[in-house]
Image (cartoon, rainbow, N blue to C red):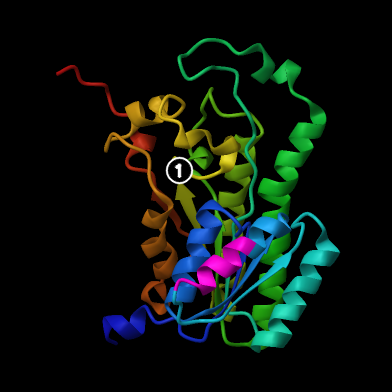
Amino acid sequence: MSLDRMFDVTGKSVIVTGAAYGLGRAYAEIMASRGADVTLLDINGDQLDRTVDEIRDSGIAGQVAGAAVDVTDRTALAEAFDAVAARQGGIDVVFANAGVDAGPGFLTPEGRRNPDGQIDALDDAHWDKVIGVNLTSIYNTMKLAARHMKAQGRGGSIIATSSIAAFYVDGIVGTPYMPAKAGVSHLVKQLAMELGRYQIRVNAICPGPFITNIAGGRMANVEDRQAFIRWSCLGRVAETDEIKPLALYLASQASGYVTGSQMVIDGGLILRPAQEID
């Protein structure tokens, strides 16, 4: 098989959750640019409309549509999946991407204690929201993807956005974020084991720090991202375009024998390299 055919997603029916901004938008852009028919789902309807229009205006090869959906609303999410399947003749690729920031951790980026981020000060409603969006909604999305793909009988690819937070603990990241992302990564492995017999591949993208709107867009601020820059082997944080090749790989037959994997893309930050003094 040629490389062009291995990476071909022309005509594939794709759903991306949390697609109005950031990594979700990047997933939608690369899929549409390569000829897939992409539906973007996001709770922010106004921004979603702008994103859909901008992707359409960029000269894409595939079709693009959007629907304002709260991924924690199981009924609304199921209706959105049913609508996509009816309109596009099924569902081939699903990016379970929606997520929210968990706020500051118990340490500041400079290493000082932050009283508001400590466990005894954590607001229970905040915990419930972070777990609900970052873990339970991923479960909801993957469950619906599996249901449709099994019924179609032609396999498929489910890709969840996890994080390097699934592999280590970090004092500057809000506590609920860590177990939520660890749960996503474990769910990916569990479902890969279950769904392989149906030729449904399930994988996780585990990003490090990217410049997105999460955490109020703080990564766009040089001062706020200094801690992550210090820890990166490459000495920088990433732009969202840098995740596109990995997304295309996992969505296409180029990764046809890959399932249950945790694809780390973090500039080596997980290694926490020693700081050299020039």
Q: Is residue 227 visible?
A: yes
Q: 58 or 147: which is nearer to us?
A: 58
x%, y% of residue 208? 44, 42
Q: Name the residue carrying label 1.
A: 211
Q: Residues within 10 Å of mark 1 (few under 14, many from 20)?
A: some
Q: Quadrant of the rendered structure where residue 125 is?
A: top right
Which quadrant would the C terminus be assigned to in this image? top left
Q: Quadrant of the rendered structure where residue 155 is?
A: bottom right
x%, y% of residue 148? 69, 79
Left or right relative to 232: residue 73: right
Q: Secondary structure at mark 1?
A: loop
Residue 172 located within the stretch drawn in magenta: no
Q: How many numbered callouts? A: 1
Which quadrant would the N terminus be assigned to in this image? bottom left
x%, y% of residue 98? 64, 54
**Residue 250 vertical position relative to residue 278 in the rendered view, above or below:** below
Residue at far right of view: 75
Left or right relative to 158: residue 43: right
Q: Is residue 202 visible?
A: no
**Residue 79 vertical position relative to residue 272 in the rendered view, above or below:** below
Magenta range is 50-58
Q: 23 or 61: which is nearer to us?
A: 61
* Majority secondary structure in the magenta region: helix
Residue located at (58% from left, 62% from top): 51
**Residue 164 vertical position relative to residue 29 in the rendered view, above or below:** above
Residue located at (62% from left, 87% from top): 153
Left or right relative to 217: residue 42: right
Residue located at (52% from left, 52% from top): 22
Mark 1: which amino acid?
Ile
